Image (cartoon, rainbow, N blue to C red):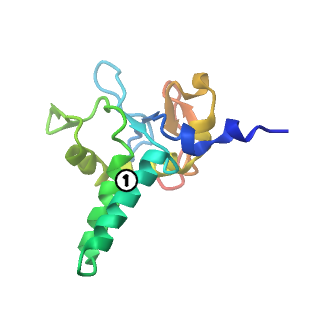
Amino acid sequence: MFDLADLDIVAKGDDAQPLDLLDPRTNTVFRDDQGNVSRVYVLSIYSDTMKKVGHEHANRTAKQSKAPTAEDLDERSLTLAAHLLMARPWEGISLNGSPLAFTLPNAKKIMAQPWVRRQVETFAAQEGNFLSSASERSSSTLGTSSGSRGTSDAPAAPSANG
């Protein structure tokens, strides 16, 4: 018999988990000259935080007197995706040679990159990434397109999506 509390993805989804970003050209973890990885901390799409953010955006849209444009919907989607990264500062990410500060506008810059967004959203949708034991979560990568986990010390398995 399983205990439903052990699988409460809503409650456990607010515990942001590390995701080491993979270079889309090589499918290996990004590392700087000192060997430090480029890492983001991701909330589950099922978390209370993400549900609340989604409701806030939907309520704002509902209060507008005009129907949202395609551009409005794209911006809303990007903003929601960026909130997946806002629980804990990322590491090893720069823009034009300068470290990228931990802000929502910068999270949107990160998530505007389709290859990053695919990795983050796939990871955020995999319940097991948030229900695993602490030792299994110490450092993970998106090893395959299905969102399986691996360690950042081992090469990642090739992705079907590159």
Q: On the picture, is 54 further left or further right than 72?
A: right
Q: Nearer the viewer, residue 138 or 4?
A: 4
Residue 2, percent across and down? 80, 39
- Viewport quadrant of the N terminus: top right
Residue 100, percent across and down? 20, 36
Residue 103, percent across and down? 22, 40
Find disc 1 in the rendering and name its residue.
Answer: 53
Residue 31 location, quadrant: top left
Q: Is residue 64 above or below residue 53?
A: below
Residue 57, percent across and down? 33, 61
Residue that sits furthest to the top in the current view? 34
Q: On the picture, is 27 further left or further right than 9?
A: left
Q: On the picture, is 19 further left or further right than 88?
A: right
Residue that sits furthest to the front in the current view? 63
Dot 1: within a 10 Å radius of its alpha carbon, few (fewer than 14), some, or many (20 or more) residues? some
Q: Nearer the viewer, residue 55 or 2?
A: 55
Residue that sits furthest to the right in the current view? 1
Measuring 24% from the left and 72% from the top, which residue is drawn there? 71
Measuring 60% from the left and 27% from the top, which residue is drawn there? 136
Q: Name which residue type carries label 1.
A: Val
